[in-house]
Each structure stands twice: as C-alpha cells, then as structure tokens.
Image (cartoon, grey):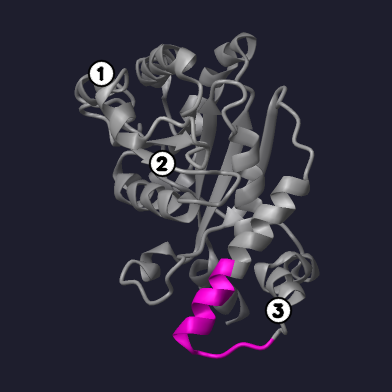
Amino acid sequence: MFHLASSLYTQYTKREQYNVLILGLDNAGKTSFLEHIKLLYPSATASPSDKKSNSLTANIKNENTGESNDNNNNNNATESNAQRSTTSILKSKRILPTVGQNTTTIKFEASDKSSPFASQFKNINLKFWDLGGQRSLRNMWSRYFKQCHGIIFIIDSTDTERFQECYETLIQIAHDDSWLLSGENDNPETNGDYERTIGLDGTVNVPILMLANKQDLPQAVDLVSLKTGVFIKLVSELEATDSKLLPVSVLENQGLKESLEWLVTRLIYNKGNKVPQYS
C-alpha cells in the first residue's frame, strides 16, 4: 500500500522539464535576461526557506506595507511595484559577459492565474542554458541542440550594424547539421523512439523565440522596422519553423513574462516532436 501511495504521489507531483537555450551575439542581454527571469520566477532547486526569502512577495513587502487585498487597483499597484523591485535589483547587479555557460532551472507560473491557459502551465520547469555569444564561442552551441526543447535568441535592437550578423547566425542555427544527428532519446518514457527534430524543409523543429531587446532606449529599432528590414528574410527562411519575433526590454522588465508564456505554449504544443524530461 505504501509503495502504491508513493508511486501515485510521485506521478501526481512530477513536473515536465523543458531545456531552453539562450543564444545571441555578445552584449545582446542574454545573461541579464537570465538574471531577470531568476527574479521573476521561483527556483526549482532552492530550499523552501530560500524560495520564501527570495520571492517577489518579499520584495514587494519591503517596498509596501505588506498588506494585500482583492481590489483590482491594489493588484495593479502590486504588479507595478514588483516590476520596479526586480528592475532595481537587476540594475544593482554587476553582470559580466558569459564565457562558457550559465544554467538555472525555474518553476514556470502563469502571470494571470485566472487565464484559461493557466491550467496547462502547471507542473512545468524550465531549465535555461545561457551560452556565451562571442564569435569564438558560437561553434560550441551545436553541442546543446540535441538536448534542447526551445531556443531564445536575443537581439540588440540598437546595434544596427550587427543585424546582418544576427540574421546569418539565426539561419546557421536553424540549418545546423547537429539537428540531423539528433538520435535516440534517453528518456525512458519514449521507449527509445527517435524524436522528429527536423521540419519538412530540413530546418530545426523546436520553437525559436526571437527577442528584440533594449526597446526602452530611444535609438532602438522598433518591431515593425525590424520585421520589414533585414529580418524580413527570416520570415521566408524560417517559414516551416515555429518562430516569433517580439519586442522586450530585459532591463526594464517589459514583455518578459508575455514572451515566455508564448514559448511555453509552443513547447507544450511541440511535445509530440520533442518529449520533455520529468523531474
């Protein structure tokens, strides 16, 4: 009876884990993105006491009275204060360029608990790999392709001189030969089946979320101009790939949760092609 109860408990509480690569050219804001995500979502590996001390609720209470109610105006104020608190914390950090990789695993939560999509976001972990974007380090990215379920590619929307380099790098990712070598899956729940990671046109078949970062700066190129400029070629090149280009400001916490919810929705939809891990 104990073993049965234990098995049922494990089955009920286990979480799907999706591995997400954070890629992009150097100085695009990849590590800042990861650091802000760590402030916005609870860690999947922290102890209960760590989660409590590091939660947004604690940050909000430090800035407010600590009282809460169901009034919509107060909820909006709380959300605004939460955004300010994570932004101020991130700005106080000294973030260095990544040489190698940074990893973290978070428990994903829907930003709107009343949303009809909130239920499908339950029991999901996201493991992020932030990989160095210097040209000399990009040849190592393909080592992670077999294990990843999705890609976040961050673009510095103020660095117009490197837009062409961003485009070429994205195309190289989508058509990398490593996707063809994605062989037998080690996940026992798939019974050793081969995953279909290649789309019908030979490109990668995992979702790619492109984030046009630094949209808070006056010199940033807006989304419409990006889509009709050099990145218009991506529309045709990645036509069979599940991809989206969205505007964000990593530093100011603009569009981060909304963008991540799009990605998680696509990761769930793509489970038939790329089976999640379980933890």
The answer to whether any part of residue 194 appears in the image is yes
- Quarter of the picture containing the N terminus is bottom right
Q: Is residue 7 above or below residue 164?
A: below
Residue lying at 54% horizontally and 70% vertically, measured from the top left: 79
The disc label shown at residue 64, or none: 3
Labels 2 and 1 touching (C-beta < 8 A): no
Q: CA distance from mark 3 to mark 1?
A: 48 Å
Q: Is residue 78 magenta?
A: yes
Amino acid identity at mark 3: Asn
First in sequence: mark 3 or mark 2? 3
What span is colored magenta in the figure? 67-80
Residue shown at 41% from the left, 41% from the top: 247
Q: Position of residue 33 (x, y in %)?
A: 59, 42
Nearest the viewer among 237 and 139 is 237
CA gap between label 2 and label 1 equals 18 Å
In this figure, which residue is indicated by the disc labeled 2? Answer: 247
Q: Residues within 10 Å of mark 2 (few under 14, many from 20)?
A: many
Task: Give the numbered dot on residue 174.
Answer: none
The residue positioned farthest toward the top in the image shown: 136
Is residue 244 visible from the viewing direction of this image?
A: no
Image coords of residue 37 (percent x, y): 60, 50
Q: Closer to the camera: disc 3 or disc 1? A: 3
Quadrant of the rendered structure where residue 242 is? top left
Residue type marked 1? Lys
Label 3–label 2 contact, CB within 8 A: no
Circle 1 sits on which residue? 233
